[in-house]
Amino acid sequence: MAVITSLLLTRHGEAHCNLAGVAGGVKTCTGLTNHGRIQVRLLAERLYAETLPDVLYAAPRRRVQESAQILSGVLGLPVHTEPGLSGPLHGEADGRPWDEIKMAFGGPPQSDPDRPYAPG
């Protein structure tokens, strides 16, 4: 008998750094906006109604942890923090505007993912 495994990936809710257009890294992520909390709450309620997950993993960044805590509260699942799910380390670009980073890099960082876009 085959075992079927489903994987559901979600993104964190709206974060202050996203709204401000800055790279919100380890040092400068200030968490979710009120709207972001509402977004995650709606996601949690939908997951609860449609497809209750078995396990909940989250990256350590603040906006992701806040999202995971909301999901955890609604779904009744503990949060498993997995450092390997972390986003990029922004180095000296942490907290700087994305427009400035893109200008200095010559485009969005994903255009050349193997090249660091900021020292550190």
Image: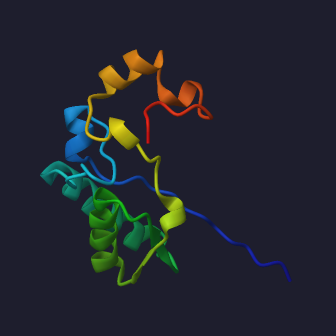
The single residue placed furthest to the front in the displayed view is: 119
Dividing the picture into quadrants, the one containing residue 118 is: top left
Residue shown at the point (28%, 61%) measured from the top left: 62
**Quadrant of the frame with the C terminus:** top left
Q: Position of residue 104 (x, y in %)?
A: 40, 18
Give the side of residue 78 with respect to residue 29, left or right.
right
Vertical relation: 107 (above or below) 10: above
Residue shown at the point (51%, 58%) measured from the top left: 9
Nearer to us in this view, 21 or 11 = 21
Q: How is the image coloured?
A: rainbow
Q: Position of residue 84 (x, y in %)?
A: 54, 63
Residue shown at the point (35%, 54%) measured from the top left: 12
Nearer to us in this view, 104 or 75 = 104
Dividing the picture into quadrants, the one containing residue 100 is: top left
The single residue placed furthest to the left in the displayed view is: 34
Vertical relation: 52 (above or below) 63: below
Residue shown at the point (68%, 72%) measured from the top left: 5
Vertical relation: 82 (above or below) 30: below
- All told, the count of numbered labels is 0
**Quadrant of the frame with the N terminus:** bottom right
Give the side of residue 32 with respect to residue 78, left or right.
left
The single residue placed furthest to the right in the displayed view is: 1
Q: Position of residue 82 (x, y in %)?
A: 49, 70
Give the side of residue 2 with respect to residue 112, left or right.
right
Q: Position of residue 20 (x, y in %)?
A: 19, 34
